[in-house]
Amino acid sequence: MIPDNRSKYFVFVPFCLLSQAYQAEGLVKYEWKSSIKPIVQLLLDNNINIIQMPCAESSFNNNLIRKPMGLTKYNHKEFNAHCEKLATLVANEIKNIITSNYKVIAILGIEQSPSCCVNYIYTNHGNEKRKGLFIEKLHAKIQDYNIPIIGINRKYITKSFKQLESIIKKELEI
Ligand code: SF4
């Protein structure tokens, strides 16, 4: 390959990490009106290539505007098939990057999302410990690569920031 100035590091982010307007109604409560700035800034400051994953919920109905709904409302055959299709596309992209000798250093989710959470999901009966419907399918397809999956918690952003920062420092040896 002809040498140039590119970064070979990648992070996959949920669509709404860059575009909060894709969140369900009433969920953009924190100070970031568009991108979740501290996380995006951390990636920019470290020259990480950012790949925006598709938004499972807005693309299911082809409409950004929706009420917030818990896991029980999304956990049905059609939505799971939709997530499966999107997870296959994202997993193939991750494989392309790795085959090209580049490095995917992390995948980010959004805590409490029925589709994109990593640790805690919103269920209409409180939170449960499990992965979201999209993230669980993506994880199943790429688990052999051992890529860290970090749930971004907008309420406790400092904790999420530190988790990602420590992975970046380790990978970039800084
Ligand atoms: S489905 Fe995922 S990308 Fe879409 S708004 Fe919810 S958390 Fe964000």
Image (tube, rainbow, N blue to C red):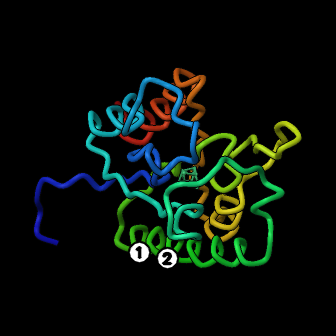
Q: Secondary structure at mark 1?
A: helix
Vertical side of 161 occupied by 50: above or below: below
Q: Position of residue 146 (x, y in %)?
A: 61, 56
Query: What is the three-letter code of the residue carrying label 1?
Result: Asn
In-front residue for pair 74/63: 63
The part of the image, by quadrant, that contains residue 135 is: bottom right
- Distance of label 1 from label 2 (alpha carbons): 6 Å
Residue drawn at 52 percent across, 51 percent down: 107
Amino acid on which the number 2 mark rests in the picture = Asn
Q: What residue is at 52 percent from the left and 55 percent from the top?
A: 65
Which is nearer the eye, 55 or 97? 55
The residue at the far right in this view is 125
Horizontal side of 39 relative to 117 (left or right) equals left
Label 1 crowd (10 A; few <14 / some 14-19 / many >=20): few
Q: Which residue is mark 1?
A: 96
> Which quadrant would residue 88 be assigned to in this image?
bottom right
Is 140 rendered above or below residue 14? below
**Left or right of 69: which side holds 109?**
left
Judged left or right of residue 124, residue 174 is left
Give neighbour class at mark 2: few <14, some 14-19, many 20+ (Cα, 10 Å).
some
Q: Nearer the viewer, residue 33 or 42?
A: 33
Give the x, y percent position of residue 120. Answer: 75, 40
Q: If the image is split into quadrants, where does the N terminus sit?
A: bottom left
Relative to 1, say whether 28 is above or below. Answer: above
CB under 8 Å between callouts 1 and 2?
A: yes
> Mark 1 or mark 2, which is nearer to you?
2
Question: Circle 2 sits in a helix, a strand or a loop, which is it?
Answer: helix
List the residue tagged with mark 2.
92
Residue 59: x %, y % from top left: 52, 68
Q: Is mark 2 within 8 Å of ligand 1?
A: no
* Label annotation for residue 172: none
